[in-house]
Amino acid sequence: MIKSNYSYGYFIKLIVALFFMFAFRFIPAPAGLSASGMQVVGIFIGVLILWLSVAIDWPSLLMMGALALVPELNFSSILSSSFGNTTFVFLIFTFILTYALGQTSVLKRIAIAFMTSKYAMKGPWAFVILYSASILFLGLFISPSVLFFIYLPIHDTIMELLGITKGHKLGAMMMISNVIMCGVSSGMTPIAHVFPLIAMGLYQDMYGMTIDYARYMLIAIPVGVIIFGLTMLVFRFILKPDMSPLKNLDVHCLKTMIEPSSPKDNVVLTIFLLVIALWVLPGLLLLLLPQGPLYSFLDRFDALGTAMPPLIGVVLLCVIHHDGKPILNIANAMAKGVSWSSLLMCAGTLAIGSALTNSDIGFTSWLSASLSPLIAPLPPLVMVFIFALWSGLQTNLCSNMVTSTLVSSAALTISASLNGINIAVLIILIGMLSSYAFATPPAMPCVAIASSSGWTTTKQMMIYGFTIMLLSIIVATLIGYPIGCLIF
């Protein structure tokens, strides 16, 4: 007899999700909402159930199939808004680039350079600040999950050199810092970070305008730096670990972990920096340059979109050879460096976001009319705080991608009713805060790994994770939003 690995709970979740996805259309709709609107809402609820409790990959494909049954939609447009979306293509190229960078010694050398600098040797807290700052810096360009696993052996090596065992507050603090800094840094730029890109992609689909990287970072980086400073203060005055072991740390031992740089490493780093420059500089220069030939060229290049710079980078890495072989084996990179589950979910979120905001479906106009009486009287900063709180809480209790999709879609669908709100800035804050997932195990895999590592506990992660989350929401509302309004 063949034993099943599936529990009754799995089948119950599946049946409930399928009911919402395929039968919700036949439930009487509220006044003003069409049957197709009910169908799309049901598909969204059904896929949310599967995303949160079963998986993120195949439910996304199931959802696209269900959307094809909506009369106002067609399968070609669904595929175009998902797999054909610029965001999806951009992520493939960016995953390949970051995989190439991860195969070099560059990241480890940068991390250890921070920790062995003259400032880091000035005292225990200086070392902790530089250790955390190195994560924050590298996280501007690297996936938070990849970055966390880069720092795990570095953390363990430091603890071994200090003679610290699991259960010590200092070891716990540095592990908590690993998780929090990975989350904060992933919200500071859209480079190699899915969650801000989902929010920005939904905004572009609805308004036909692009939120460029430069202006995103002019808002998100100052907020992240402030959160970094507040985190260090929380560690010092609330967590208050015994710092005496760090007084005897020989940081020069860390230098033994540095692998020598190779010509191949230098080429990969140079191309990666070129791609970052192509992402950032056109948007910045367009704000500064007067009209002219250079302005026109940059404007035309910027209009090519975010997928062009990493495409150029990938092609260069494949064309340039070292020791008779291309620097990048694209087949290996596609197999080992691309998170296909994340990409499938990203495609799904783009498809459902497009359906929710489709004017023929009418969901946006219905939601706007329903919520307008409740939202219109609220002051702008109160509305910003509500969406920031929603983003921060949900991303720390479930999936970042679901949070970015759901909260961004809600904000966009009622944007016409958000009087006095700069919707572009609000979307940036939602995408940024969707990355700040560091309080509970369901938020990110690295939280679960840290909580079960023995260095810290689920309780500690929740206490300090939710503390930093609340501070992040306040900073995003009171500092990030006003900065954004000056830029947009």
Image (cartoon, rainbow, N blue to C red):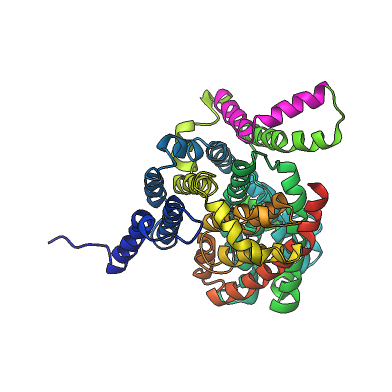
* Residue numbers of the magenta segment: 293-319
Q: Quadrant of residue 149?
A: bottom right
In magenta stretch: residue 141: no
Q: Quadrant of the N terminus?
A: bottom left
Q: Residue most toward the front?
A: 31
Q: Main secondary structure of the magenta part?
A: helix
Q: Nearer the viewer, residue 379 or 116?
A: 379
- Please state the horizontal and vertical placement of residue 114, each as a whole percent of the image: 73, 54
- Please state the horizontal and vertical placement of residue 360, each as a whole percent of the image: 51, 44
Q: Residue at x 71, y 26 (%)?
A: 300
Q: Nearer the viewer, residue 200 or 222?
A: 200
On the question of residue 475 being in view, the answer is no
In magenta stretch: residue 303: yes
- Please state the horizontal and vertical placement of residue 396, each as a whole percent of the image: 57, 66
Q: Residue at x 64, y 69 (%)?
A: 162
Q: Is residue 149 left or right of residue 77?
A: right
Q: Residue most toward the right?
A: 290
Q: Residue at x 81, y 58 (%)?
A: 119
Q: Residue most toward the top?
A: 293
Tally of numbered discs? 0
Q: Nearer the viewer, residue 484 or 108?
A: 484
Q: Is residue 21 left or right of residue 248?
A: left
373 over 136 or under it: above or below: below
Q: Is residue 159 left or right of residue 378?
A: left
On the question of residue 134 being in view, the answer is yes
- Please state the horizontal and vertical placement of residue 192, each as a whole percent of the image: 60, 45
Q: Quadrant of residue 426?
A: bottom right
